[in-house]
Image (cartoon, rainbow, N blue to C red):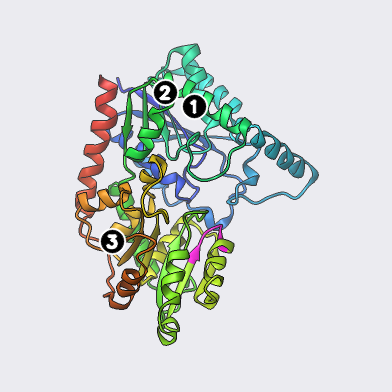
Amino acid sequence: MNKTIVILATAFHPLKVIATERVSKFVRSFAKEGWNVIVITIDDKNIKPKFYDNSRDSFLCKYNIKVIRVPHKFKEFYYIYEVNKNFSTYLLKILSKILFFFGVDNSIGWNKQVEKQIETILKKEKIDLILASGSPFMMFHVPYKINKKYKIPYILDFRDLWYAQPHGNKNIFQKLLSKYLEKKFMDNAKLVTTVSEGCKTKLLENTKNSSIEVLYNLPDEEYIKELENIREKSFDYDIGIDKNYINLVYTGTLYEGRDLSSIAKALSYMKKEEQNNIRVHYFGNQGSIAIQNFKKYDIENLIINHGSVSKEESIIAMFQSDILLSIIHNNEKSIDDNIKGIITTKIFDYILIGKPTINIAPVDNETRVLIRKLNVKNINSFTANEVNNIIDYIRNIHHKSGLNILQNKFIDIWHIHFKEKIIKNLKG
């Protein structure tokens, strides 16, 4: 008889954002290993059109995945959902900010409903394992609570750090609560997984549980097929990139220590006629930071802020780029394991897409190690201070296109990775 796993994730199909990808790979991998998979996620109402994609219906049917969608009181505050502008919405928003001040994230409004769903499942069938993945992290309280009541083992998957998060200033309440809860939840977990060795090191500082495994965000076979389909669409899609320029593209988060200042500085040193042929495109929520980076060097005409886009549109932008930008951190050397262990999910997209890539990272960052280990040729790493080398790279780049030939290696690596880090541990 097949075992049953319940996977908890606030982001899942048909929501098309980067947070869904890691969960989807877990879902597919457990299904391929013969498990019955049940996913409990947020309901799919009020998703903004650009973040809605039901193309994965076939994958759910193929693996017979059961999806339970649960209402979320605070979900309208996510940038991916339409917001109803009424009194109750503003009241919830105020409550959300108060809770966050004391270290409680928005998933607290979801947990009770999830617990009820698990209780309902248990009345019909046995649950052998629970996996909770991602951010926010108060959701990790659910498998902990179920474990205490029913002795069901659970896995906690840290898609990002929580207590030891390298960006964002926590107040005293947030620090105390997050450290206490993270330790309690991890201490009782069957297994803890995370995305890099640096994250693993930081997690080990706050738990007596030694069962922590690194599971890199490597793409699986289905994800590679999706990239191929997006590539075909990218040829005729207008994302706002003018082919008359050399286009540098960055997608994702910016914050202090991780911004476009090194790129802006390098471009400011180039000749005016060279600058006029270059445009830098930013896709994400922190456009003001990107613009400020370029204003500092009086070249704000070179930066184009596109704002938030869907995961698919960000991939299209990558395909249409001439040079991709990967910003890990501006430090010359990592100040701690937080910075050392940063491996952005999109670095694997960059590898597969195969475009020339500038990777700004400390000399000891784990991304550099991984790039060497995988023998990646299209990604070149620099520190933020290597301005002249960055300039030379932009001047001498040879444009490429298409998916990287490493894709078949990735399929093997993902499956071996998953079996060694997850299945082997569960059997043990």
Point out the image quarter for the C terminus: top left
Q: Secondary structure at mark 3?
A: strand
178 in magenta: no
The mark tally for this picture is 3
Q: Residues within 10 Å of mark 1 (few under 14, many from 20)?
A: some
Magenta part of the protein: which range? 282-287
Q: Secondary structure at mark 1?
A: helix
Q: Amino acid at mark 1?
A: Glu
**CB atoms of marks 2 and 3 within 8 Å:** no
- The residue that label 1 is drawn on is 182
Q: Secondary structure at mark 2?
A: loop
| Residue at the bottom extreme, as displayed | 273
Foreground pick, 144 / 226: 144
Q: Is residue 396 above or below residue 224?
A: below
**CB atoms of marks 2 and 1 within 8 Å:** yes
283 in magenta: yes
| Residue 103 appears in the picture as rendered | no
User: What residue is at 78 percent from the left and 47 percent from the top?
Assistant: 86
Q: Amino acid at mark 2?
A: Thr
**CB atoms of marks 1 and 3 within 8 Å:** no
For the residues labelled 2 and 3, the Cα–Cα distance comes to: 35 Å
| Left or right position of 120 against 94 | left
